[in-house]
Image (cartoon, grey):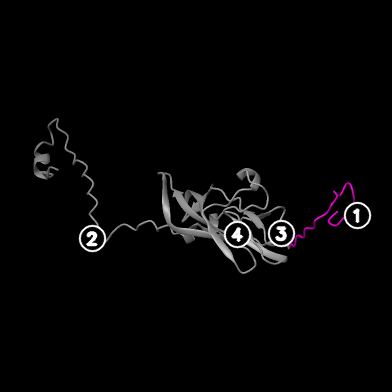
């Protein structure tokens, strides 16, 4: 920027040259003092995403939440990946939860972990009361309160693509009553149609 010369401007007062002082350039913004930084966006933790948590999953015991003592009862938990949107720290975002683990609590003092929520006997092409990856054998008759806890991994999208969040979100499901009965067999000489009063008919 040229320095303004007031004396030269007076000498040229009667000339055709205008005498105006040029507008001064804006001063550049000074750099921040050493040791100071711009405030960083808060880091997102798995606890921050609890407000977007999936709904609890209720397990189902085959067949129809009824079993037979000494035979497998098959458990199925229908958890799946899903996405929710909202705001966090006043910023819009999307959260995607994916089930990564299951803990089946059987209600008789035992539990089992699995990487899958299980499938029905029909979907597996198996006969009822056969073992599966998520089945359990109750030893005594009675009523048991069973439930499943699902662990989810989480990813967030702030508008620039998905990135994972460290940790897992654990969602326990509601208790389900499983009734276990005893089965008795008897050798008979006739079918129930032939002799309706026979044992077991």
- Tell me the distance, in whole angstroms, between the alpha carbons under discs 4 and 2: 55 Å
User: Disc 4 vs disc 1: Cβ atoms closer than 8 Å?
Assistant: no
At x 63%, y 55%, the residue is 75
Query: Majority secondary structure of the magenta segment?
Result: loop
Nearest the eye: 51 or 13: 51
Quick one: SS at disc 3? strand
Mark whose residue sits in front, 3 or 2: 3
**Residue that mark 1 sits on:** 197
Q: Mark 2 falls on what kind of element?
A: loop
Residue indicated by mark 3: 68
Residue pointed to by mark 4:
148
Instruction: Indicate the secondary structure of the residue bearing disc 1.
Output: loop
Label 1, residues with CA under 10 Å away: few <14, some 14-19, many ≥20: few
* Left or right relative to 162: residue 39: left
Left or right: residue 197 compared with residue 134: right
Of discs 4 and 1, which sits in the foreground? 1
Answer yes or no: do the residues labelled 3 and 4 have beta carbons within 8 Å? no
Residue 196 lies in the magenta-colored region:
yes
| Residue linked to disc 2 | 33
Determine whether label 3 and label 1 are within 8 Å by CB: no
The stretch in magenta equals 181-201
Would residue 8 appear left or right of 165 to someone viewing this image?
A: left
């Amino acid at each position: 920027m040229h320095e303004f010369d007031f004396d030269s401007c007076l000498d040229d007062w009667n000339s055709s040259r205008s005498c105006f002082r040029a507008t001064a350039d804006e001063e550049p913004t000074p750099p921040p003092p050493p040791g100071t930084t711009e405030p960083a966006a808060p880091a997102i933790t798995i606890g921050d995403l609890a407000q977007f948590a999936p709904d609890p999953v209720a397990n189902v015991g085959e067949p129809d939440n009824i079993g037979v003592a000494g035979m497998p009862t098959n458990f199925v938990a229908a958890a799946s990946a899903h996405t929710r949107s909202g705001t966090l720290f006043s910023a819009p975002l999307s959260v995607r939860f994916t089930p990564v683990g299951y803990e089946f609590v059987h209600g008789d003092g035992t539990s089992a972990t699995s990487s899958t929520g299980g499938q029905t006997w029909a979907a597996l092409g198996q006969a009822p009361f056969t073992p599966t990856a998520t089945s359990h054998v109750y030893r005594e008759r009675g009523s048991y309160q069973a439930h499943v806890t699902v662990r989810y991994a989480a990813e967030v999208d702030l508008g620039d693509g998905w990135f994972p969040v460290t940790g897992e979100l654990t969602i326990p499901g509601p208790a389900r009553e499983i009734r276990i009965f005893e089965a008795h067999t008897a050798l008979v000489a006739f079918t129930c149609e032939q002799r309706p009063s026979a044992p077991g008919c």
